[in-house]
Image: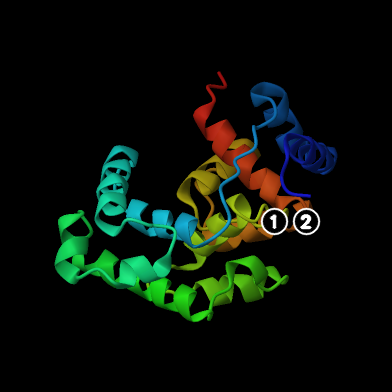
Amino acid sequence: MGLSAERLREGMDAIAALDEHVAAALGRAGYPEPRIRAQGYETLLRTIVGQQVSVGAANSIWGKLEAAIGDIADPRALLARSFEDLRGAGLSRQKIGYAQSLAELSASGAIDFANLPADDEEAIALLSAVKGIGRWSAEIYLLFAEERPDIWPAGDLAVQAELGRIKGLPKRPTEREAREIAELWRPHRGAAAIFMWHHYKTSVL
């Protein structure tokens, strides 16, 4: 089913019918476009590479990593490379540890990306077993690569900022407050998250 344009519209319409603040924001910013990524090991590896660096820097490192590894979609190819090879591609010592952790769990079958648990919290817990993959990264993967409709990354600062702005709050809500506010929006919180990023980039004077 996934978070297609049609599903996003349906989700946002359902939320707007329940929340006048969201309805007003939707009227200003319009519907968001789908944000779909490929399912699997490679996408999560990209998440690790992109942590705490600019998009441009992440793309540059990814290109070097592809050249150093060869078949970057195969976790065994990464495990076959030395620390020096990975460091030369631009990965920090810490990120090398994260990438190797992901590759080991993927190559061993401990994480089977084609058969992650259907329960969102169980899937988040499994992905979080990878070093360097916290709740936010796991949620982002499940939202964009698996297109799970009720993922709500309440720890994301942009999501918090736009939620506060849309709801007219005096300050940015905490992660806990963001989760409480969005409870009313189940089971469409994935659409709401994508809308928050869409609204964040949209000028709404």
Q: Residue at x 76, y 50 (%)?
A: 188
Total labels: the figure holds 2
Left or right of residue 192, residue 35 in this image: left
| Disc 1 crowd, CA 10 A, few/some/many (<14, 14-19, 20+) | many
Left or right of residue 93, residue 142 in this image: right
Q: Is residue 194 above or below residue 70?
A: above
Q: Residue 204: give x, y in percent of width and height.
A: 57, 22
Q: Is residue 5 above or below residue 131?
A: above
Left or right of residue 79, residue 128 in this image: right
Report the front residue among 88 and 128: 88
Residue marked by disc 2: 186
- Identity of the residue furthest to the front in this view: 70
Residue marked by disc 1: 148
Q: Secondary structure at mark 2?
A: loop
Colouring of the image: rainbow
Tell me which numbered mark, 2 or 1, is placed earlier along the sequence: 1
Q: Residue at x 82, y 39 (%)?
A: 10
Report the front residue among 115 and 133: 115
Report the front residue among 69 and 87: 69
Quadrant in which residue 198 is drawn: top right
Q: Residue at x 24, y 48 (%)?
A: 64
Q: Residue 162: give x, y in percent of width and height.
A: 55, 40
Q: Is residue 65 above or below residue 166?
A: below
Q: Type of residue at label 2?
A: Arg
Q: Please indicate, yes or no, whether residue 83 appears anywhere in the rendered image.
A: yes
| Disc 2 crowd, CA 10 A, few/some/many (<14, 14-19, 20+) | some
Quadrant in which residue 60 is drawn: top left
Q: Secondary structure at mark 1?
A: loop
Q: Is residue 157 above or below residue 17?
A: below
